[in-house]
Image (spheres, helix red, strand yellow):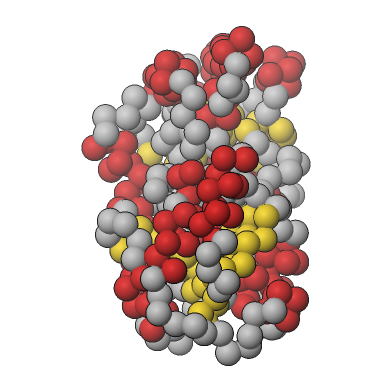
Amino acid sequence: MSPDANFAVLAYPSNREALSNPYVRLLYDEAAGGHFQIESFSIRGALMRRADIVHLHWPEWTIVQRSPWKAYPRLLAFMAVIWLARARGAAIVWTVHNLHPHRRVSRLREALLYTFLRRAVDRQIHLTEATHRAMEDTQHPARVRRRTVIEHGALVDRASVPEPGAFRQKNGVPADARLIVFFGGIDRYKGVPDLISAFGELDDPNSRLAICGKFADRSIERQVLEAARTDNRVLVRPGYLPEEELAQLAADADLIVLPYAAGLNSGSVFYALSVPRPVLVPRTDTFVAVSRAVGDGWVHTYRGLLTSQAIEAALSSRTPPAHPKIPSWRTIWLQTEAVYAEAIAERRGRA
């Protein structure tokens, strides 16, 4: 690959699209002024122009429409333009954030999408080696051998984290209270009712639990609010948190608990570690890998159902003196560039 050449990347989604997860913005901001020009992927754009790379992040977005009359045409159009891009010489790269949609609306659509991706994708990027092992262990239809591990980056600049105290002051949380926090979208798989139940068994009147985030639907909202109603130590703040308030919340937390019943990777974990604040998560292969990567004492895990004992043990642990080891986005982008270059060389070698 010529060092002076410029290459077009169609990214799905791109850094120009608003996302609650800033991963793509932070990644592609590092591409500015370089040899890879990032453009937003769309069906029309992929038809109109030739690309050297198509980089997919959340391809499952193409199948989560509840109406099959909308979902199947959208999926077929997506597959058609990816094949067209390949026919024009593009290499297809997929960063595997999830193995399935969080809300599984159709196993047939999943089978079609992931079988297609296995044939279409030239390179997979995994955030941990555990992701690939999960694909192999479950015989995931999109599993391939051509993969590279590129670790997750920090989701907040540590220099921009506010001084502690603002969230507590605004919400009547005593300065000396032990504050446990859940933040992010609140859906069934996130385990929030289990967190409220376990916290309720914590025999400490000086502890507080703050649950802040947007509910996925009315059903989970009613379930969470009903569970929280019997414990005046629980504060529920429904709705999307602006960036400033999220930073204040994380800065005031003694422990961030994310008891996901399902899912693979978590941007919320890396937001917490970026502040930095210790986290408590289920003991999965992915979170064990993250714990080893960032250093001891930052990621606490539990097996089975979340308990008050697991919360107490994490709260009582000493916070490490050193910050978590998280790679810079510059390093992550350079590793991504290397994957692009290898994928382009392989595609052209087969042409």
Q: Position of residue 25 (x, y in %)?
A: 68, 49
- Picture coordinates of residue 98 (x, y %)? 46, 39
Q: Is residue 16 above or below residue 267?
A: above
Which residue is at a point 40% across and 79% down the rendered structure image? Answer: 203
Q: Nearer the viewer, residue 350 or 44?
A: 44
Is 202 drawn above or below residue 326 in the view shown? below
Q: Is residue 151 visible?
A: no
Horizontal arrangement in the rendering, residue 261 relative to residue 60 (left or right):
left
Q: Residue furthest left?
A: 137
Q: Who's the residue at 49% across and 37% down the image? A: 102
Seen in the picture, residue 251 relative to 343 is either above or below; the reply is below
| Depth order, front residue of 141/330 | 141
The quadrant in which the N terminus is found is top right
Percent coordinates x, y for residue 94 in the rendering:
49, 34
Query: Residue placed at 71% from the left, 33% from the top?
Result: 40
Does the image show residue 304?
Answer: yes
Closer-to-camera residue (285/102): 102
Residue 144: image x %, image y %?
33, 30
Could you tell me which residue is drawn at 62 percent across and 40 percent down? 218
